[in-house]
Image (cartoon, rainbow, N blue to C red):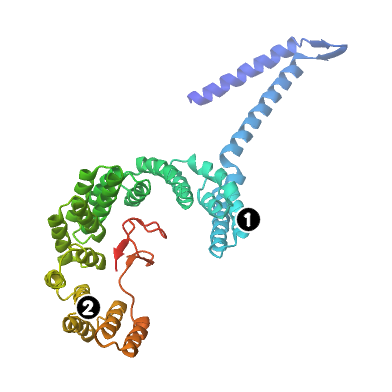
Amino acid sequence: MIRLGFYITLAIIVALGAVWFADNPGALQVNWRGWEIRMSMAIYTLLVLLYTVLCWYLFKLYRWFKTDNPLMSPKRLASKRERGLAELDQGWSALSVHDNAAALKHGTKALSLLPTDKGPLRLLLKASPEKTQIKYLNMLDEDANSKILALTFRLEKELNNHNSKEAHNILLKMHKLSPDNPWICKKLFDVLTRLGRWAEAIQELNKLVKTKAMDGSEQKRLSAVLNYSQALEADLSGQKKAARDFTEQALKNDPSHIAAALFLARHHLAGDDKGRARKVTETIWRVAPHPDLAQFYLKLEPLESASEKFRRIQKFADLNSDHPHSLHLRAHVGLDTEHWADAKQSLDTLVKTDRVSRETYHLLARLEILQKQDKKAAEAHMVNAENACSDPTWQCNVCNISRENYTATCPTCHTFGGIRWQ
């Protein structure tokens, strides 16, 4: 009832206004640069009304395009996304067969269809040549969610270029973004070893153990390698006591570290402490016999007689009597001191237990020459030596490449601590 009364009142006001305009029509005159426009007030009012209605409809049209634009409809957006994902899949497929040109083509198309998605950027980053990669890296850097991906790509590039210093800076940024990530911690440890920053590497190694990213046995072995590297560095700088302390710590972490044992034994021998040198060698021989240890022990008493040398080496070999290196050492000293029967017994033991190696046949050939002057039998043993397995050497447990001398880091695959006596 109130609404009906409102509309009746509004109609009466409009009617009175129309009557008033009819009684007072008036006139509107506009002069502008020689032009003259004349119209009644009724026509002017009608034009204003029509202009207002037109503006109102234009505003509604603008709002419709903004909210219900057919170009931005959910169906059209879903179709566009499906085409973008299809292009992305085709790009990765092309990259998997090393067709970088096709991968770039599909990646560019996917980026135009999925401008807010980071998938096309990752594809373009992998497929692009090095000169144009920086553009996509910068685009990934702008997004916090993909920043670590860009840093990982930069890290791989610096590691391939052997730029350990810049790789370390990148890893520090990655560590801030993801401090508990085990992969980042391991890479940081690896780069610190490349830079020779042994103390920091040990700290990072301890963090890996705390986060259970590495077991305790592996941690001790790598700690021994780090301690040995510190010992070498201290020895080169003239810090003999520090070098000895680091080597002792290395052997405490890994009693079978041959290089550290030899270093410590030679260090004691250089300091006229033959007793400690002997004790270190004997201790390691119980755990891990090694030909270099045997050669060191053989030369430890240069002034002794042949019989004294034979008895001393026999006692030393008894510390690990069944090991092939102990039997080789017995045979070697038997040949040097003309104890042919003892030498032959040790070598026959190796042959019977099928632990024969190239060194075994070399010693057998030498025995034939020294005892019987039988060159024909010696030549037969040398032929067997060519077909026998090689003597144990230092070998990387990652790339399986052998080398004669010990190195803390594999020169081939750059794995730290991967070199072991095989």
Q: Amino acid at mark 2?
A: Leu
Circle 1 — which element?
A: helix
| Residue 209 picture location, percent across and down | 23, 51
Residue pointed to by mark 1: 105
Q: Which mark is on residue 335?
A: 2
Q: Which mark is on residue 19?
A: none
- Which residue shows up at 60% across the image and 55% down it? 104
- Select label 1 or label 2 by which is in front: 2
| Residue 253 picture location, percent across and down | 19, 55
What is the crowding at mark 2: few (fewer than 14 residues within 10 Å), some, or many (at least 20)? many
Sooner in the amino-acid sequence: mark 1 or mark 2: 1
| Residue 341 picture location, percent across and down | 17, 84
From the viewer's side, name the closer residue of 186 and 120. 186
The C terminus lies in quadrant: bottom left
- Which residue shows up at 35% across the image and 52% down it? 183
From the viewer's side, name the closer residue of 287 and 71. 287
Say which quarter of the image contains residue 403: bottom left
Q: Amino acid at mark 1?
A: Lys
Mark 1 near mark 2, Cβ–Cβ under 8 Å? no
Above or below for 313 versus 417: below
From the viewer's side, name the closer residue of 34 and 273. 273
